[in-house]
Image (tube, rainbow, N blue to C red):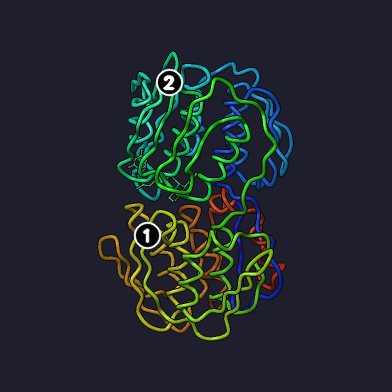
């Protein structure tokens, strides 16, 4: 299995190009299920999760071509099932549930089960689909849903769920009548999906606010559309500059999407300057400790919590990091502590006491964002860090070691 080896201490300098967003590509690619014919999606990152969604769509009968620019044709759907082995490798596979029921009248999707960062149920997806008139049964670990035609309804999400909002927004596009999604997720990826759906002939308004209105249409048509830049990848590089020091231009990202992080990094003493085409990120001084609470967008993203904790572990002072989105997202703590970090967990908060320097160590990735935090820790640590189980990082970061190495880090991948 591959490992990533980092020798810490190099400052980061130069330009890094941000890829398309994984979390936007997945629903956007799935949306092709609603619009028979060839759709074309631009700026799709080259990641393991993208391969998984392609496999799932092909399994349903879709034809798919290309990398980066991906063409998908869902004219002939021969199966309406997302099997357990695909859903358990990637929970976002559940996104096919809504579109399949809306277009085919039936879907059978495996329940994902727990994952490293918490229980992560899909009860809100299911409840909303029932509100749209689908009959839903749980059988042999699968959600089985059917509906002759879904019917528009007002749906209230108890929690603003990102993939839940996307799933039901897609389903409602082909429903009879108007659907209102209340307490909807406001993430930029939801807006990206709504724009793609509208390009396919859907009538979606309000995406990006907490109330989304969908007026059902009879039919949708293929589209050519682009995926937004990955705000989590951009944020990871911004935090990396804080950890290693230096001056890096994060190219091709959308500054508004990382505003919550920008404000926090400025409070921590970094210089963050958006310009046309990216964000210049400079760290000259010792980082000051700041407190963080994760929240749904536009709050501070949970997907940057682990990376921020790595940064706070070498900051000046005490930081309190509170995780409110997932109940078990502190798996990186014990690995950071192996590198010398001083962290105490109390409930859903972590008290991080900054130390002058982390020390390189063999560490193990436990989930996607946790692995990113360990790479950042390695960049700032004294000596060598060896990260194993790097398949987690390959799910969501395109060639992360090449991107870091191009801006001056001493990092390489070894297979073994
Ligand atoms: C998406 C992102 C993930 C990110 C997360 C939160 C994708 C592919 N993944 O995941 O990277 O970390 O948003 O920003 O876009 N919940 C329920 N019942 C449900 C659905 C969710 O209780 O039916 C809970 C979850 O357990 C969690 C919270 O709602 O506590 C938010 O989760 P959600 O927004 O649904 O996360 P995902 O869409 O799975």
Tell which of 332 and 237 is nearer to you: 237
Looking at the image, residue 400 sits to the left or right of residue 292; the answer is right
Image point 38% across, 68% down: which residue? 292
Query: In the image as oriented, which residue stretches furthest toward the top?
Result: 148
- Could you tell me if residue 316 is visible in this image? yes
Q: Of helix, strand and loop, which one carries label 1?
A: loop
Whether label 2 touches label 1, CB < 8 Å: no
Q: Residues within 10 Å of mark 1 (few under 14, many from 20)?
A: many
Tell which of 302 and 176 is nearer to you: 176
Q: Of helix, strand and loop, which one carries label 2?
A: loop
- Residue named by callout 2: 150
Residue 213: percent from the left, percent from the top?
A: 44, 36
Which quarter is ligand 1 in?
top left
- The answer to which image quadrant residue 322 occupies is bottom left
Q: Residues within 10 Å of mark 2 (few under 14, many from 20)?
A: many
Residue 412: percent from the left, percent from the top?
A: 67, 64
Looking at the image, residue 313 sits to the left or right of residue 376; the answer is left
Residue 164: percent from the left, percent from the top?
A: 42, 38
- Could you tell me if residue 139 is visible in this image? no
Residue 54: percent from the left, percent from the top?
A: 62, 33
Tell which of 155 and 92 is nearer to you: 155
- Residue named by callout 1: 330
Tell which of 212 and 90 is nearer to you: 212
In primary-sequence order, the first of circles 2 and 1 is: 2
Looking at the image, residue 102 sits to the left or right of residue 40; the answer is left
Looking at the image, residue 274 sits to the left or right of residue 172; the answer is right
Q: Is residue 307 above or below residue 248?
A: above
Q: How many marks?
A: 2
Q: Which mark is residue 388?
A: none
């Amino acid at each position: 299995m591959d490992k990533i080896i980092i020798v810490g201490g190099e400052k980061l300098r130069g330009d890094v190009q941000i890829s398309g967003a994984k979390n936007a590509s997945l629903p956007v690619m799935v949306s092709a299920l609603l619009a028979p014919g060839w759709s074309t999606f631009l700026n799709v990152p080259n990641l393991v999760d993208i391969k998984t969604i392609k496999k799932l769509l092909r399994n349903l009968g879709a034809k798919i071509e290309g990398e980066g620019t991906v063409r998908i044709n869902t004219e002939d759907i021969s199966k309406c099932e997302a099997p357990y082995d695909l859903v358990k490798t990637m929970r976002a596979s559940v996104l096919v549930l809504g579109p399949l029921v809306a277009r085919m009248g039936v879907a059978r999707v495996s329940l994902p089960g727990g994952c490293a960062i918490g229980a992560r149920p899909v009860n809100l997806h299911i409840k909303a689909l029932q509100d749209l008139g689908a009959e839903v049964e749980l059988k042999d670990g699968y959600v089985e849903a059917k509906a002759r035609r879904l019917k528009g309804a007002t749906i209230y999400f108890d929690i603003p769920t990102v993939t839940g909002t996307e799933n039901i927004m897609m389903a409602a596009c082909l429903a009879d009548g108007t659907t209102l999604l209340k307490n909807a997720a406001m993430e930029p990826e939801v807006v990206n999906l709504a724009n793609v759906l509208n390009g396919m002939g859907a009538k979606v308004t309000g995406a990006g606010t907490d109330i989304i209105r969908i007026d059902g249409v009879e039919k949708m048509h293929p589209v050519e559309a682009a995926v937004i830049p990955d705000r989590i990848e951009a944020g990871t590089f911004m935090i990396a500059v804080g950890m290693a020091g230096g001056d890096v231009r994060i190219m091709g990202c959308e500054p508004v999407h990382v505003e919550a992080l920008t404000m926090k990094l400025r409070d921590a003493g970094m210089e963050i300057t958006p310009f046309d085409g990216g964000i210049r990120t400079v760290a000259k001084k010792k980082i000051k400790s700041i407190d963080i609470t994760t929240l749904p967008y536009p709050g501070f993203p949970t997907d940057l919590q682990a990376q921020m904790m790595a940064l706070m572990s070498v900051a000046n002072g005490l930081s309190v990091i509170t995780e409110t989105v997932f109940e078990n997202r502190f798996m990186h703590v014990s690995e950071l502590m192996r590198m010398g970090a001083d962290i105490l967990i109390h409930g859903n908060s972590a008290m991080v006491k900054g130390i002058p320097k982390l020390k390189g160590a063999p560490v193990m990735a436990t989930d996607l964002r946790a692995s990113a935090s360990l790479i950042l820790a390695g960049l700032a640590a004294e000596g060598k860090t060896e990260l194993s189980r790097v398949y987690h990082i390959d799910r969501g970061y395109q060639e992360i070691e090449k991107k870091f190495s191009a801006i001056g880090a001493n990092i390489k991948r070894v297979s073994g």
